[in-house]
Image: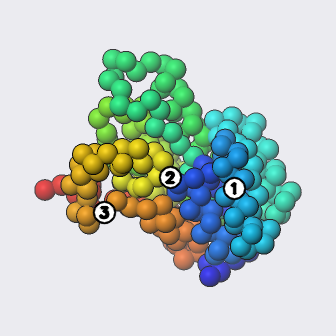
C-alpha cells in the first residue's frame, strides 16, 4: 500500500479491461484517480466501486481522447478537484474493424484508429506537461501493444498506431527528461480484456493463442496494471524512454 501516496493520476480508457484494473490498483496504492472513458455508465460503476472501498478518491469524466478541447477540460477538472497531475496513463485505444485486408483499408478507418490510439496520446501529453512542470516531475505511461513492436497481419492501422505510440514515447522521453518527466511505453501481448474475450470463448482461437505463449496462459488485466504501477511510481525514477513487453515470452522466436 502507498506506492502512489500523494499523487494524482489521469487514466484514460478506464471503463473496463486494463484501464479499470489500473484505476483500482492506483487508488489502492494511494493515488487520487481521474478515470476517463467514452463508456460513461460503465466508468461510473468502476469509480463507484473504488470510492465505496476507499472513500472519495476517484472521479469519472466522459472523455474523447481524440478531441483536444476535451483534453483541456479533463486536465482542468483534475487540477480543480485534486490540485495537480503527477501521472498520465494513456490507456484508451481501439482495434478498429479488426481483421481487414489492406486493399479494404480506407482513410476513414485509418484516421479513426490513428486519432484515438496515437494522436490521443499526443494531446494528453501536451496538456499534462505544463502541470507536471509545475511539480518538477511526472510519469507518463503510454499503453502500446506487442503489435507495435512485432507487427500484426490484418490489422495495419492498429499496428501502425501502436508503432507510432512506441516511437513517440521515445521522442517525448528525450524532450521531457530535462524537466524530470519520465515517459515509457508498455506492450501487452494476449490479455484477457474485452478486445479479445469474444475470440477466447471459441476453443480453436483460445488454443491458437495459448500455443504462442510459452508461459502457457493468457494474461489478466492486473498483470499489466502492476507493471504500469511500477513505471508510474518513484521506484522507476531512472527509467524513461523504455518499452516494457508483457507477453509471457510470446515475442521470443525460435
- Residue closer to the observer: 207 or 149: 207
Would you place residue 237 above or below residue 91 in this image?
below
Of helix, strand and loop, which one carries label 2? strand
Q: In which quarter of the image is the C terminus?
A: bottom left
Left or right: residue 138 compared with residue 218: right
Q: In this view, does 16 lie to the left or right of 187?
A: right
Q: Real-space Cα distance between discs 2 and 3?
A: 21 Å
The residue sitting at 52% across, 20% down in the picture is 108
Of label 3 and label 1, which has the lower sequence position?
A: 1
For mark 3, give the secondary structure. Answer: loop
Q: Is 185 or 190 nearer to us in this picture?
A: 190
* Residue 143: assigned label: 2
On residue 217, the disc is 3
Measuring from the top left, give residue 240's x and y in whole percent: 50, 63
Residue under the point 21% across and 55% down: 211
Name the residue tied to disc 1.
Answer: 45
Pick whichever of labels 2 and 1 is earlier in the sequence. Answer: 1
Amino acid at each position: 500500500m502507498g506506492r502512489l501516496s500523494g499523487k494524482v493520476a489521469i487514466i484514460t480508457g478506464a471503463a473496463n479491461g486494463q484501464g479499470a484494473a489500473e484505476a483500482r490498483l492506483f487508488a489502492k496504492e494511494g493515488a487520487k484517480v481521474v478515470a476517463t472513458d467514452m463508456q460513461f455508465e460503465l466508468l461510473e460503476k468502476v469509480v463507484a466501486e473504488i470510492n465505496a472501498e476507499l472513500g472519495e478518491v476517484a472521479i469519472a469524466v466522459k472523455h474523447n481522447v481524440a478531441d483536444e478541447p476535451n483534453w483541456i477540460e479533463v486536465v482542468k477538472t483534475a487540477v480543480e478537484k485534486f490540485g495537480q497531475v503527477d501521472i498520465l496513463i494513456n490507456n484508451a485505444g481501439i482495434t478498429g474493424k479488426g481483421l481487414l485486408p489492406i486493399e479494404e483499408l480506407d482513410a476513414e478507418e485509418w484516421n479513426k484508429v490513428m486519432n484515438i490510439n496515437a494522436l490521443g496520446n499526443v494531446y494528453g501529453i501536451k496538456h499534462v506537461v505544463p502541470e507536471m512542470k509545475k511539480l518538477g516531475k511526472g510519469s507518463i505511461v503510454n499503453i502500446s501493444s506487442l503489435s507495435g513492436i512485432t507487427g500484426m497481419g490484418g490489422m495495419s492501422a492498429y499496428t501502425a498506431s501502436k508503432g507510432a505510440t512506441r516511437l513517440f514515447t521515445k521522442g517525448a522521453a528525450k524532450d521531457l527528461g530535462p524537466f524530470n518527466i519520465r515517459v515509457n511505453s508498455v506492450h501487452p501481448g494476449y490479455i484477457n480484456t474485452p478486445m479479445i474475450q469474444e475470440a477466447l470463448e471459441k476453443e480453436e482461437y483460445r488454443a491458437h493463442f495459448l500455443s504462442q505463449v510459452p508461459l502457457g496462459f493468457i494474461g489478466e488485466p492486473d498483470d499489466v496494471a502492476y507493471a504500469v504501477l511500477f513505471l508510474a511510481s518513484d521506484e522507476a525514477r531512472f527509467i524513461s524512454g523504455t518499452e516494457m513487453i508483457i507477453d509471457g515470452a510470446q515475442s521470443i522466436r525460435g
